[in-house]
Amino acid sequence: MMKRFFALSFVAALFVMCQFLVACGDDDNNNGAEQPQVPELTINLTIAQTPAIDFTKSVDQSVSIFTPSLSLSSEDAQLNRYEVTFSNEKILNADAQGHVTASDLKDVFESIFGADAVGQKELPVSVVAVVDYDGKSELSSSVSTKVLVRLNAASYATAENVGRKDIMLQGFYWDSQKVTGWSQMLSHVEDVAKQFTCIWLPPSASAEGNATVGGNNVGYHPRIWNDQNSCWGTADDLKTLNAKFHEAGVKVIADIVINHRAGYTDWCNFPVDDFGSFGSFQLTGEHVCSDDETNTGHKADDAWGAKDTGDKWDGARDLDHTNEYLQKDIIAYLSWLKAEMGYDGFRYDLVKGYEGKYVGIYNEATDPYLSVGECWDGNYDVVASWINATGKKSMAFDFPAKYAIFNDGLAQSNYSKMTWKEKDVDRPAGMIHNAEYRSYSVTFVDNHDTYRDNSKYTGDVPMAYAVLLASPGIPCVFWPHWTSDADAINGQIAVRKLVGIGAESPCEVTSSGTCYESLTIGENGSLVCRVGKRASSEAPEGYVLSCSGTGWYYFISENLAE
């Protein structure tokens, strides 16, 4: 019993001694002092916003987007970089002075706002300081500010992205045959050539009614396609006029009426279409739509073509464009007009009367300098669908812009209606608001049809053309407007040419409240257009007044005024 007690006591004593040794440790290694701690780093960051960065002028390789003030609680801490986040998505690194590269900043803005962004843009940014301390990277709290950048630089626009720079004149109006007939127009060739690249002439085929020179039929019910003697003048006068326009550098656009055709001696009786080397064709009732009113209002079974592929026109026979023989006849006709009469391009009348794909077929075969269809509809989707149906082989008159910008907007001083959104950017309303269709848009204020019905623009004409000629698309000036306000319109055309504005020029509406203001980028510079009864005449920073009139102002970028 004693032996056992002794053994247990020895073990207990040994355990207590071990515990003491563990508790006391080795005096050489631990004298009871605590291990030194690395002090906690305190980072204080404040930033001041930099004034607007102006890409309209020369920008250095590096740009200060904010001015930092950084204090660290330890001399051993060092700034590594600043991380800058734009709109919670794009991150750039900035140096100790808050600098980033100009090209990186430009890329950020283009990725967020689009490559054709113009005007003054503001982006929220957050900044974090990345600090190296004790072998680790420490982050400051995030500090927020804003970056203001002007992106209306002329250098943003090149010949590639402004598109074709045609300016068209509609060289007639309803019943103007004694004013703008072929012989009368000869005296205007020189003046037209100073302003316009192309002119749209009225239908020149012999037509139903009084088709004698100076007669009262303007040609929209053609009867004999290969007879170009009309109320507007003789075929020889037309050839002479077109040749003079070509000498002056002006392209001539024919008014093509192929939706329908008047009968020769009866409703479905047509003459032979003799186009010389391009072929000879004889149309019959087989080439008239079977649902044409001739079958119900004149003679049963007079027409036996396919049913109409578009809207019906009850004034003449609706032609069946599904018929391949008719297609060949029309292609021969258009080819003959170019070769024999000297036309360069086509304006297609009443294109809602047949499927758009047929215009694509005709243009594919004849290669016009310019093709534009009269798709008379204020609905954007309808006009876009027609353009698409042609295979994008034709432009269309921008009726949506005509109604939104001019009739409903400017004429009523309702500037907000002049603007439509493309994503988050305000653009001029109509087809031209969408980058996909700007190059397919022919813009206008009025034409021979709208000028004489309740679609007529009733506002100030020079104000309307200030908007038209500062916008993308191909502008078409109406003869009565040009002749009544030539000084204003010619001045506006001169500025459009100076800036180098084209059909695809980026254009942003920068105000649509008390006035309408747009900024358009051309090949050579930029243009601010300001229109409205309360529009200011004060030039924006970086711009100078170029020309103006009552209620409208054109300001050009300073580089163009030097």
Image (cartoon, rainbow, N blue to C red):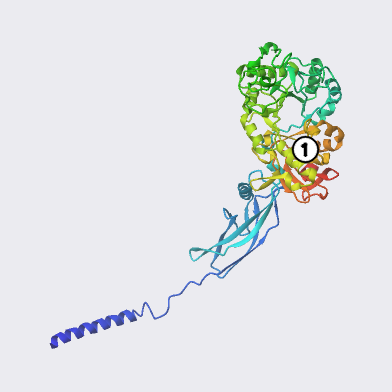
| Dot 1: element | helix
Count of marks overlaid on the render: 1
State whether residue 147 appears in this view.
yes
Q: Position of residue 397 (x, y in %)?
A: 71, 33
Q: Identify which residue, 148 or 507, lies in the foreground.
A: 507
* Residue 350 placement: quadrant: top right
Q: Identify which residue, 120 or 346, lies in the foreground.
A: 346
* Residue 321 placement: quadrant: top right
Give the quarter of the figure containing the C terminus: top right
Q: Which residue is mark 1?
A: 496
Placement of 79 over or under 386, stated as above or below: below
335 horizontally vs 27: left or right: right
Q: Dot 1, how many residues are within 10 Å of its Cα: few (below 14), some (14-19), or many (20+)?
A: many
Q: Position of residue 107 (x, y in %)?
A: 61, 47
Q: Position of residue 212 (x, y in %)?
A: 83, 17
Q: Identify which residue, 24 or 448, lies in the foreground.
A: 448
Give the quarter of the figure containing the N terminus: bottom left
218 horizontally vs 51: left or right: right
9 horizontally vs 232: left or right: left
Which residue is drawn at the image coordinates 74% and 45% (left, top)? 518
Residue type, numbered disc 1: Arg
